[in-house]
């Protein structure tokens, strides 16, 4: 498995979109800080030209990271079905299950590295360009990362599962969007009428990530559940769903014929 | 007696009610070059996909190095190099990068094997050129380089000369013969270019509608195809008389175009040429006629062509 992971890392290091993805996301976030700084410079009473607003804005946009995880998973998967490259590995006696798990691990490694680089650029540019708010912004950002990390793991596991099962990238992304976004939205709507759907919708990752936010006064993050239970629930709900979808994918891929 | 290293027992692959491979019993001995012959859709590629683990058998078993469990088959497949259907690689990487990716994945020690494999197939000069810009022939060569990179004991090659120019075909044929003779690599090769197979293989398997209809050695096929020496001389009658009187050969035929077809002495044509020259007969042509594999194959499958 280590060899397979190493080879995948070698492959993504030779793929230009590996770098372009990070560059584009970082540029967009740095640009937002440049805009805030420019407005603050031209209008001294502008209240949002500070690190608290910039990082709070980032924290409030965690559902955007959720969507980006779908892109990252699909990108790192490398269109194996379209390229027909998986047959080279299977023909060499590498078990399908090992390929499946290794791909997921590489997707997680890339996503974490990309997240820290992009976040690093955003935070650094905020501290360089904007007024310091001294409100423990980085501490709150760290708390958000801890709460949302398992949700991103779920998204990556789901993307990996569907990427293996569906031979068309479009169908796989359609399934991702359907399960990760449309299903929770429908669940929430039904939850307004039926309590059981309400309870189900609460533990779906998309709804959890949308429940994560920040208040400015006091400067603190909010989770869908109050207190420490908020973190536990985020982790338990996401990890259980991640394991479930990983196992389903694993079982299916072990009997899937490779073209 | 050479050891059987790859075999199938009543191997069957069904897609709904259609049997793409039907009760195939195959035995490939170490050091053999086995030619798998069949028309399009006969089941050649499906059989190779089953052997390489890309598809799963509906019935029957595969025995690789005497073992047939899934774990053992996967272990055995590490000693096999394959090209199944078209070679497939990452479009945005060069030949060297693609091979390096698989070298790391397969934990093949030393980077030299990548360079050696590229040199072996004539792709060492491609530099940074991306796979997406390769011609079909270059892609085929890269597929072969991958198959050879991990120093396999068996090669499973599905139409490996597709897309190659005549020079490429000769190069690859010579390479396969060399690998077989020098490194004792066992080769299973399927091809539509039947005359090309006849220059290479030591055993044949003819497959049609998923059924292995005949398996025989090249020698047996040669006998069945009635291989002969074609002789063109200026005095046909005299040559015929000499064949009978001096060599006691009666298995020959005089043709209306004044050629002789001799069904003996295939392995010793010098005797025929010496007989002609020493008796003052001008020898214009002496050749062993190729096996007419196409005709044999068409006869075997009933001359129905592709379905």
Image (cartoon, rainbow, N blue to C red):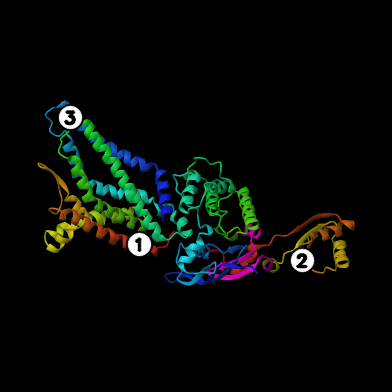
Q: Chain of mark 3?
A: A
* Number of other residues with Cα within 10 Å of mark 2, as a class: few under 14, some 14 to 19, many 20 or more: some
Q: Is residue B57 visible?
A: yes
Q: Mark on residue A39?
A: 3
Location of residue B248 by image quarter: bottom right
Disc 3 secondary structure class: helix
Residue B52 visible in the displayed image:
no
Write down the region rendered in magenta: B194-220
Residue drawn 65% across and 60% down?
B198
Measuring from the top left, give residue A167's x and y in whole percent.
38, 57
Q: Secondary structure at mark 1?
A: helix
- Reply yes or no: does residue B204 show up in magenta: yes
Residue B283 quadrant: bottom right
Q: Which residue is mark 1?
A: A250
Q: CA distance from mark 3 to mark 1?
A: 51 Å
- Badge 2 is on which residue? B263
Q: Residue at x 35, y 40 (%)?
A: A20
Discs 3 and 1 lie in a common subunit: yes
Q: Give x and y (percent) for residue A198.
A: 14, 60
Q: Nearer the viewer, residue A78 or B204?
A: A78
How far from the left and from the top, in percent, is residue A116? Answer: 29, 43
């Amino acid at each position: 498995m280590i060899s397979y992971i190493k080879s995948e890392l070698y492959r993504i290091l030779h793929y230009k979109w590996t770098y372009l993805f990070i560059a584009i996301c970082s540029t967009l976030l740095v640009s937002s800080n440049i805009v805030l700084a420019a407005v603050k410079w031209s209008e001294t009473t502008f209240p949002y030209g500070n690190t608290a607003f910039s990082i709070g804005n980032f924290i409030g946009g965690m559902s955007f990271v959720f969507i980006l995880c779908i892109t990252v998973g699909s990108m790192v998967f490398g269109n194996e079905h379209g390229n027909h490259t998986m047959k080279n590995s299977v023909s060499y006696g590498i078990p399908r299950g090992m390929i499946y798990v290794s791909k997921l691990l590489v997707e997680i490694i890339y996503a974490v590295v990309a997240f820290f680089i992009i976040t690093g650029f955003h935070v650094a540019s905020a501290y360089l360009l904007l007024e310091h708010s001294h409100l423990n912004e980085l501490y709150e950002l760290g708390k958000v990362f801890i709460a949302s990390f398992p949700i991103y793991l779920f998204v990556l596991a789901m993307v990996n599962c569907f990427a293996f099962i569906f031979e068309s990238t479009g169908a796989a992304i359609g399934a991702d969007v359907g399960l990760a976004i449309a299903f929770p939205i429908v669940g929430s709507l039904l939850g307004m009428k039926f309590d059981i759907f309400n309870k189900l919708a609460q533990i779906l990752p998309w709804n959890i990530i949308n429940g994560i936010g920040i208040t400015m006064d006091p400067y603190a993050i909010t989770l869908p559940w109050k207190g420490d239970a908020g973190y536990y629930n985020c982790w338990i709900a996401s990890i259980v769903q991640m394991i479930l979808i990983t196992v389903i994918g694993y079982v299916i891929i072990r009997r899937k014929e490779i073209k | 007696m050479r050891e059987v290293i790859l075999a199938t027992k009543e191997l069957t692959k069904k897609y709904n009610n259609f049997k793409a491979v039907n009760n195939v019993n195959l035995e490939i001995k170490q050091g053999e070059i086995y030619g798998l012959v069949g028309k399009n859709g006969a089941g050649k590629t499906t059989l190779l996909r089953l052997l390489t683990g890309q598809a799963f058998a509906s019935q029957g078993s595969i025995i690789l190095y005497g073992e047939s469990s899934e774990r053992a088959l996967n272990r055995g497949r590490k000693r096999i190099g394959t090209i199944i259907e078209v070679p497939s690689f990452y479009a945005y990487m060069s030949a060297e990068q693609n091979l390096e990716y698989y070298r790391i994945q397969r934990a093949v020690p030393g980077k030299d094997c990548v360079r050696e494999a590229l040199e072996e197939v004539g792709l060492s000069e491609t530099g940074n050129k991306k796979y997406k810009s390769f011609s079909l022939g270059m892609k085929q060569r890269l597929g072969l380089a991958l198959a050879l990179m991990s120093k396999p004991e068996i090669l499973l090659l599905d139409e490996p000369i597709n897309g190659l120019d005549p020079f490429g075909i000769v190069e690859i044929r010579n390479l396969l013969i060399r690998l077989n003779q020098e490194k004792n690599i066992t080769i299973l090769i399927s091809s539509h270019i039947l005359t090309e197979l006849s220059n290479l293989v030591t055993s044949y398997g003819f497959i049609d509608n998923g059924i292995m209809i005949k398996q025989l050695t090249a020698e047996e096929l040669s006998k069945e195809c009635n291989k002969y020496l074609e002789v063109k001389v200026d005095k046909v009658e005299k040559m015929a008389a000499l064949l009978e009187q001096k060599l006691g050969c009666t298995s020959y035929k005089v043709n209306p175009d004044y050629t002789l077809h001799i069904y003996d002495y295939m392995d010793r044509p010098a005797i025929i040429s010496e007989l002609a020259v020493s008796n003052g007969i001008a020898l214009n042509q002496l050749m062993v006629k190729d096996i007419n594999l196409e005709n044999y194959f068409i006869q075997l499958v009933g001359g129905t062509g592709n379905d």
